[in-house]
Image (tube, rainbow, N blue to C red):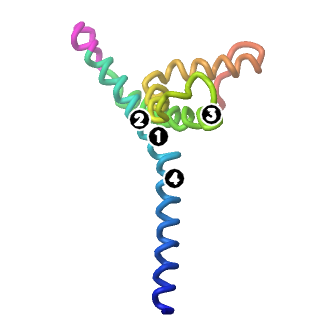
Amino acid sequence: MQRQRLEAQYGAELLLRSRNVLTSMTEHCIPLLMGVLGAFAFMLRTLTMELRNHTRQRSSAGLALIRVCLGAIAGVFGVALLADAEKGPLVGISPLVVPFLFGYGIEIVFSVMDRIVQAFNGGEPKAAAR
């Protein structure tokens, strides 16, 4: 009897931990990966157009790495924006679409953020501190 109770308690604890891990992955890891996937999709799309038009120039691997990192950040940011938007224009959109789009259109996301910062700074964006 005691053993059955312990097994039931252990099973309930294991189930709770599994749910916590799954929730964490859903809220953080998957949006991050979708942002990275969006960044990769943009890079592949750009590469395809450059190869088709014979305009491909040698580019830095560092730029690609930066784009992927920014895509990951933007993916998590996109999900955070949707967290409180229960009602609104994005209600019917899957939560996985927004991080992908933010990763794909990273320039747009960060240019909007730059404009918001400019509005509070009252002018031109300041250079980042080094």
Q: Residue at x 27, y 9 (%)?
A: 55
The residue under label 2 is: 36
Q: Amino acid at mark 4?
A: Thr
> Which residue is more in the foreground, 123 or 25?
25
- Badge 3 amino acid: Glu
Residue type at tag 1: Leu
Residue position marked by numbered label 1 in the rendering: 32
- Considering only order in the chain, which callout, 2 or 4, is on the residue closer to the N terminus? 4
Residue pointed to by mark 3:
86
State the residue at coordinates (27%, 13%). 50
Residue displayed at 58% across by 22% down = 89
Residue 14 percent across, percent down from the top left: 47, 70
Distance between the alpha carbons at the discs numbered 3 and 2:
25 Å
Q: Which residues are magenta?
A: 49-58
Q: CA distance from mark 4 to mark 1?
A: 14 Å
Q: CA distance from mark 4 to mark 2?
A: 20 Å
- Closer mark to the observer between disc 3 and disc 2: 3
Question: What x and y, as percent, mark residue 100?
Answer: 43, 30
Residue 56 magenta: yes
